[in-house]
Structures are given as C-alpha cells and as structure tokens.
C-alpha cells in the first residue's frame, strides 16, 4: 500500500518583549489566543512564559509569526488589541498572501493605528483595509464616492475627515446634505415647520457631529454658517467654494439631482458622496443617481470610487452576515 508522504512541518518561536504584559497579547482569559487558535486550527500553538511557539504547515506558521509582529507594533503605540481587530488583522494578512490580483500593500498595524480625528477623549480610526483606502482616497481626490452596505463607516469616516479638514483650516466650512426622500410619509402631511419636518432625515448627520465636536459649540458653528446641515433641494443654484461637502444616502437621489449636486463644486472644495445601492427608496420608475453615476464618472481623473463590503461592517458581527444573506437572496431572485 502506497503511503501518502507527510506534509513537511515548520517550527517557529516568538518572544514577546518584556514591556508587553502577556495579558495584552493573549487577552483576558486567553480570549486573543483562542482567536488565533481558531484561525489556525492545523497549527499547534503553545505559550510558556513570554515565549509563543507554533508547529505546523510552514505557510501558516510564517503567517502566525507575521501576525504576532503586527500585534507588537499595534501594542507599542499604546492601543489595545481587541478580538475584532485581531480577526481583521488575520484576514488582511491572508489576503496579502493568497496571490490575489490586487496585492495588499498596507499592513494591519498601518491600518489599525492610523488616526483621523481625536475628540472628546476618543480617537476615530479606520478598522479595515477598505476603510483605510477610503480615507486615503479622500485625502488624494477632489470627489470620492463611498459605496457600501450599512455599518461600513462610509458617512462616519467622511464626517471625521470633514471635521479634520475644518480644524486644520483646509476648508472654512462643512456642508452636510442628504435627500429628504418621503419613505412612506409625505412632508406636507408631517406636523411642524419646514425645519421640523426635515429634521428626522438629517438627524443621523447631527448625531455624528455630536460624536466629533463639543455639542455646545455646534449651535454656534451652525449659526455662523461654518457648519450647514440641509436637505439636498437647498443646494440648487449655489456654488460651494472652500468647503467640505458630504452627500449622504446618495442612492436616493435622482439622476438629475446627482448631476445638480456634482456641478455645485467650487474652488478649493472637496466632495464625498456616500450611499448603498441596495437600499434605494425612490418611487418606482425613478432611476438612482448613484447607480447611474458609476457608469458615467468611473475612471475620470480626480474622481474615486471606494467600494466597501460586508467584510467592512464595523457594527455587530451579525450585521455583516445579514448583509451577505440578503445579497445571496437578491442574487438568487435575479437568477445569478
């Protein structure tokens, strides 16, 4: 009987520097160690003192060595390593080593330690590779589209970049807008003044602002025109100079509205447009401006499309699985 040749195994040992307590590497009750063991089930991992050893497939063992080195770089900055960040780091390293057409040049440490904005005792950072590339694209391009499902940080990161640009005096004002789509209710039938009617549509933008600025300063900044939050209809006929402009929920713009908005761009301004093309609330027969614009502007100089996926969802893990399940259902309905 012919015997199957045994797979050659590799052995590696990693020494955790004394300045890093092992609990920061292994996690409370070894929670981080369990994440690594679950991600590399065919590798024997042992910990003794501040030594971590791994025995198994050479490729997997090398990956664990790189992972531990990345963990040390993150911990060296004073940031904690969470289970979620560790899982994302493993995914990034695997993507870098699977020979895919799109090489991953960024390391997990570069992604997880990039600061966008520090405010009120917390720092806003990208949490995934696509989020980092989205943030970098905002720095490099005049118009950026952030397209992806709910929970991928499209609007939140754009808001953080807007506040950063204002604080560093790159722009003199922030303009936040979104279409007031009548999802089941017509504005004319809602009680209150016009501003009270449109407030529910703009509330998510106010909520993000309160996370990033002193809430007491927001009314003053809005009264001075430094920050403007308004429905998309208010943008018509204006030229927006020296501003950071965010159009949120752009999947609910018509083709005409999208063209109108894009042509508001003035000198020394930047535009970020966010939306989820799978959640269009427009009346039947109305074409989404966000869906259409991809075929019109893709490849145009100084315009960038960042596409985020369920893997970039930074809410509860179940949200990403829900997004995938709906995508699978939609594909089956469309015969894909």
Image: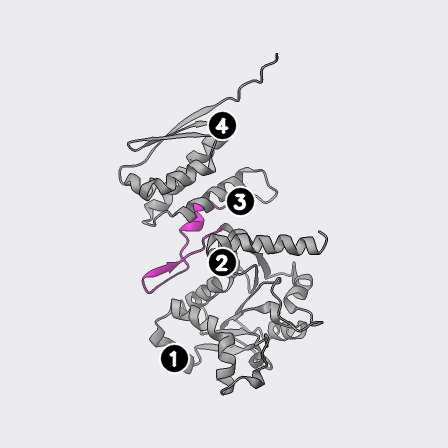
Looking at the rendering, in which quadrant would you find the N terminus?
A: top right
Numbered disc total: 4
Q: Are marks 3 and 4 in contact (CB under 8 Å)?
A: no
Label 1 or label 4, whichever comes before in sequence order: 4
Q: CA distance from mark 1 to mark 4?
A: 59 Å
Mark 2 crowd level (few <14, some 14–19, many ≥20, 10 Å Cα): many
Residue beneath disc 1:
219
Q: Which label is found at residue 120?
A: none
Q: Which label is found at residue 135?
A: 2
Q: CA distance from mark 3 to mark 4?
A: 22 Å
Kindly state the secondary structure of the residue where label 3 is placed: loop
Q: Residue at x 27, y 37 (%)?
A: 18
Q: CA distance from mark 1 to mark 2?
A: 27 Å
Q: Which label is found at residue 104?
A: 3
Label 3 or label 2, whichever comes before in sequence order: 3
Kindly state the secondary structure of the residue where label 2 is placed: helix
Residue farthest to the bottom, as pictured:
193
Label 1 or label 3, whichever comes before in sequence order: 3
Q: Which label is found at residue 57?
A: 4
Q: Nearer the viewer, residue 234 or 328?
A: 328
**Foreground tag (4 vs 2):** 4
* Among the 4 quarters of the image, the one containing residue 235: bottom right
**Foreground tag (1 vs 2):** 1
Q: Are marks 1 and 2 in contact (CB under 8 Å)?
A: no
Label 1 or label 2, whichever comes before in sequence order: 2
Give, as a single range, the part of the protein colored magenta.
Answer: 106-128
Q: CA distance from mark 4 to mark 2?
A: 36 Å
Label 4 or label 2, whichever comes before in sequence order: 4
């Amino acid at each position: 009987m012919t015997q199957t040749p045994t797979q050659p195994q590799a052995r590696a040992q990693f020494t955790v520097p004394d300045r890093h307590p092992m609990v920061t590497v292994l996690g409370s009750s070894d929670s981080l160690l369990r994440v690594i063991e679950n991600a590399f089930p065919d590798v024997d991992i042992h910990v003794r003192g501040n030594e971590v050893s791994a025995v198994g497939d050479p490729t997997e063992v090398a990956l664990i060595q790189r992972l531990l080195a990345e963990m040390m770089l993150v911990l060296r900055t004073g940031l904690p390593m969470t289970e979620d960040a560790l899982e994302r780091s493993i995914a990034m390293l695997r993507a870098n080593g699977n020979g895919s057409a799109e090489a991953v040049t960024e390391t997990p440490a570069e992604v997880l330690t990039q600061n966008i904005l520090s405010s009120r005792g917390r720092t806003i950072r990208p949490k995934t590779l696509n989020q980092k590339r989205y943030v970098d694209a905002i720095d490099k391009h005049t118009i950026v589209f952030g397209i992806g499902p709910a929970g991928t940080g499209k609007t939140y990161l754009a808001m953080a970049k807007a506040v950063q640009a204002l604080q560093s005096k790159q722009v003199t004002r922030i303009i936040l807008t979104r279409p007031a789509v009548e999802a089941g209710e017509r504005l004319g039938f809602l009680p209150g003044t016009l501003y009270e009617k449109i407030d529910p549509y703009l509330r998510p933008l106010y909520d993000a602002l309160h996370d990033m600025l002193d809430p007491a300063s927001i009314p003053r900044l809005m009264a001075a025109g430094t920050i403007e939050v308004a429905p998309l209809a208010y943008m018509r006929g204006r030229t927006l100079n020296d501003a950071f402009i965010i159009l949120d929920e752009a999947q609910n713009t018509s083709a005409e509205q999208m063209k109108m908005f894009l042509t508001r761009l003035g000198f020394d301004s930047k535009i970020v447009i966010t939306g989820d093309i799978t959640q269009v609330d427009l009346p039947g027969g109305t074409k989404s401006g966000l869906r259409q614009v991809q075929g019109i502007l893709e490849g145009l100089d100084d315009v960038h499309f960042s596409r985020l996926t369920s893997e970039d969802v930074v809410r509860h893990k179940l949200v990403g699985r829900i997004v995938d399940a709906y995508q699978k259902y939609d594909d089956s309905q469309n015969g894909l």
